[in-house]
Amino acid sequence: MSNEIIIHPDDILKEGWLTKQSVHLKSWKRRWVVLTPQYLCSFKTESERRNPTECIRVKDCSTVKSATEDAGKENAFRVDTPERVFLLIADTAQEREAWIGNIGKSMVRPTMMVDEYE
């Protein structure tokens, strides 16, 4: 799936460097993370807009919250999906809160749009 995703600059809600825990080895890697209304994707470099290292659909996210205790690291937060928990670390507490807020708004937005038309 992730090879088919292309990020358009007009779709970006938030982007920046985060440290992400890898799925298999559980090692921490610095990644450029991009949030759009549909996806949260990570890339190896800031200029990369194709071939994300990992991508999740925002509509599949069930929770986004602070996770300093879960990760054992300052400024950590988690994004939960049915398949996996993504652990991420921001550089500052303010950045962590900004990511949590933006992802949270994106998770709610599609539901709100459906309710408006009912």
Image (tube, rainbow, N blue to C red):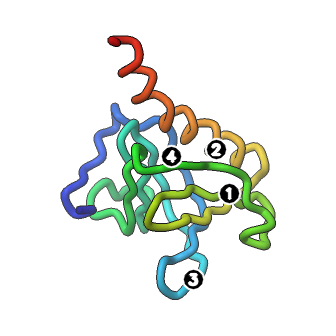
Residue depicted at x 44% and y 66%? 83
Residue 84 horizontal/vertical position (percent): 49, 67
Q: Nearer the viewer, mark 3 or mark 4?
A: 3
Q: CA distance from mark 1 to mark 2?
A: 7 Å
Dot 1: element: strand
Q: Is residue 96 above or below residue 28?
A: above
| Front one among 74 and 117 | 117
Q: CA distance from mark 1 to mark 3?
A: 15 Å
The residue that label 2 is drawn on is: 100
Query: What amino acid is found at the position of numbered circle 1 in the picture?
Result: Phe
The residue that label 3 is drawn on is: 26
Q: Earlier in the sequence, mark 4 or mark 1?
A: 4
Q: CA distance from mark 4 to mark 2?
A: 12 Å
Q: CA distance from mark 2 to mark 3?
A: 21 Å
Dot 2: element: helix
CB-based contact (under 8 Å), mark 2 and mark 3:
no
